[in-house]
Amino acid sequence: MTDITSSVPSVPPVPPPPAAPPSSGAGLYFDGRTSTRHEVTVTLGDGTMRIAGGDGAVLAEWGYNEIEAMAAPEKVLRIGRRHHNHHDLAAPLERLEILDSAFAAEIDRRAEYIDRTGALARHHRNAVVLWTVAATACLVLAAYFAIPALAGRLAPLIPFPIERRLGDTVNVQILATLDKNHSGEAFECGHKLGEVPGRQALDKIMQRLQDAAALGFPLRTIVVRRKEANAITLPGGLIYIFQGAIDKASTPDELAGVISHEMGHAAHHDGTKAVLQSGGLSFLFGMLLGDFVGGGAVVISAKTIMQLTYSREVEAAADAYGAVLMNKAGGDAHGLATFLAKIGGATEPGMTILLDHPLTNARVAAVNKLAAPQDLRPFLTNQEWTALKRMCSG
Amino acid sequence: MSSEGVSGTETGGGVRFLGVDRDYWRLLIRGAVLLAFTLGIYRFWLLTDIRRFLWSNSEVSGEALEYSGTPQELLIGFMMAIVILVPIYTGFFLAALDLGTLGQLSSGLAFVALAVLGQYAIYRARRYRLTRTVFRGLRFHQEGSAWLYAFWSIFWWTLTILTLGLAYPFQLASLERYKMRKTYYGELAGSFVGSGWRLFLRGLPMWLALFVPLALAVGVAVAEVDVHAIGAAMAAPREGASESGQGGAPPTTQRQAPTPSTNPGSVDSGTPGRSGSGSSSQSNQNNQKDQNNQGTQKYQNLDQAGGVVAFAILMGIVSVLAGVGMFPAFQAMVLRWQLSGVRFGEFALLCKLRTRDIYKAYLRFLGTALIFSVVIAMVGSTGAVIVKAIVGDNLSSGPGQIMITGVLLVLYVISMLGYSTIYRGTVELALWRKGFESLQLSGLSALENVKASGKPASALGEGLVDALHVGGF
């Protein structure tokens, strides 16, 4: 393999004077108008190089700053005209090919934009790498700070009907994951005859909390047959209370505390924010990442990381809202604290609820600090509470 | 036409591939590293490098091809694709929010629309690549309507799926004819002479090897179910007679809808709620009467059913193995057929690609990937040890979770990039190199004195292909 950039020619067939660089040489020329191959003699002048055919007729004359190297096999210098603007793209694709390495090196030396050492290409590539890495860093920062901030600002601005519709769409997926046996209607508690009093008792709690909260939009609560002590709130004020949460609650105030925490999520539009946030992330990365790693996995990982960092603040805010709401509604906010302490002790397997929640002790302390029971009125009579506890037993 | 300067002979040969594997690997590995650091944005540059390498090293009658496309063009094409796709995606997202008919239809509509757009993109991308392919100072170009191609292609795909792949050869022939007739080298129009029937006949043994086991499995399963139903219907009166007095409903009814009133077994056990499986309660109930007789019959049925399941699974495995094992042969067959059908006027290709070369390439891929997997596993366990050392046992804590997710993410990216690089360096390169080297050209004089024609096309198609992940290189 000959090194074309080397100034020492490797055993030339006709030995030229070794000291002086060759000022003319053989080449192959294509005029870009037909595919005919012209064997030419190239003569290097002061400002231009002249390409002449076998009969001596000049086929082309190129200035050294008008030409550049085109993609070619390693041992060939392929020269074409540089494109100055878009219209040049349609211009004939004149090509000159030089095989002799010493002659190629001499052209390289004279032509500004021909660079066979690759320094020009390397420089270009480094710029590309530098700027794309910078852009990537920018995108990651945007994902981490700008998207949550944007989602936070936008979520409260979304009109309630749209938020509700969003919630209904999310609900289809949530139900599919929660209701594993596809039991449909039977998955919800409170429909059977024996369960109706329990449902009425729950509605009583809901009524009092909603009156105190004055959210400005209606809430819906659904109790579902799931063993975990959990509750979730979807966009548009749909609250799922798991059977396990009712089982774990020992007083109406504990249950009301959990519900007021969830109402905090509704009031803060946390569900909508989460949807906007994950949509924004998918969009940002899903589009830009090629399919080289299947962008989806990266997006999911990024979401997990973000959820882990952001959910603490979100849960703490919902706790605070819940405690204040309980105070307002004449309930005992300590109920929320005792309930949190209770579920902090034993998690149900397979649920990440506690991973999503800030350390229980800190939460309990924060809620207890805010709790200022005044004008305490019981949420339910003993009879109603018993009915509520049996709401899913039917 | 002059024959001056044509170094290749009119019959056979006339092609060389000059590329050195090591150079290609260097290009790929550098590209993979940069892809990781730029979250994939570098792909436009890597793709251009790859094409430049492959094109430049492919020599036809002493003259190497030239790829004149640039990464900037691909980047612009991608931006154009985003401009087109963002409103479409937004529209479908909003439609999906609709709870009525529109919402229900939206995912199907989106699938169809994106499928059509994907085929459209493939045709446009081909146009871009052709207009960036220069040979002897002339570019190739492609005419024809990308929309027409897209609808035509979707029509064929539907037919192919409905016929379980039997229409595939005719699909390829038809689409290839369309593409090649619209393909020009300068003013010289291309054509495609490959016959769908020929490919069909060659591919038929493979199709049979794939589908006969599946058909057997399905057939036996269907036959078995019928036997069950018939057997049950025939056994019912006899059972009723032998049970004398129990007065049970026919077993078939029990299996479908056992109710406390007609199922003596449930009455006996006193659990009307346990009406889940009719057959088990039936066998319970009959155990009291003639245990032996019923028991053996049940076990025979079980044996038979087990046999059917085992047979179906076996046949499924045979089919999958056949599919995986034959894939390289299939690929080689299609490539041979496809390249041998290409014509530009009198200029003709004949592809003598050897199937074993493609198998060798896949084996190389598997071997390299295996070594790479071992390395990744070692790196992964080291990472796990380090994470463990830092966060201790508190893996469920916030920082622990973040670190674990981070390590997994890094491992995932490295391994995916690694596998795709290995695939490109082994299988893709071999397909190009071997496919090209095995060509025999004839009628080379047709390429002499061709007049220039065609303008460079935009890279919109490339951008859409990229954004829609419809593949191709």
Image (spheres, rainbow, N blue to C red):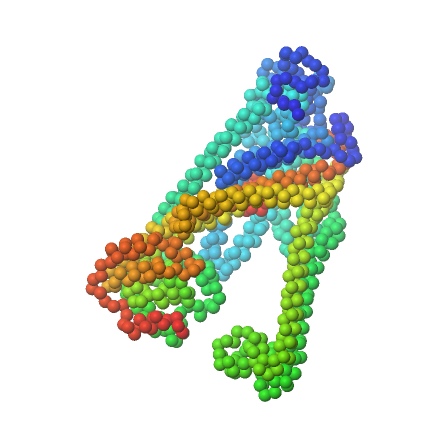
Decide if residue B461 is in sight here: no
What residue is shown at x 52% (from left), y 82% (from top)? B268
Q: Nearer the viewer, residue A359 or A43?
A: A359
Q: Is residue B289 above or below residue A373?
A: below
Q: Is residue B276 above or below residue B48?
A: below
What residue is shown at x 49% (from left), y 30% (from top)? A127
> Looking at the rendering, which quadrant does residue B292 occupy?
bottom right
Q: Is residue A383 above or below residue B431?
A: below
| Residue B190 image point, x, y percent | 70, 40
| Residue A215 image point, x, y percent | 30, 59
Residue reaching furthest to the left: A375
Q: Is residue B282 left or right of residue A56?
A: left
> Looking at the rendering, which quadrant does residue A333 occupy?
bottom left
* Quadrant holding the C terminus of chain B: top right
| Residue B279 image point, x, y percent | 58, 75
* Quadrant holding the N terminus of chain B: top right
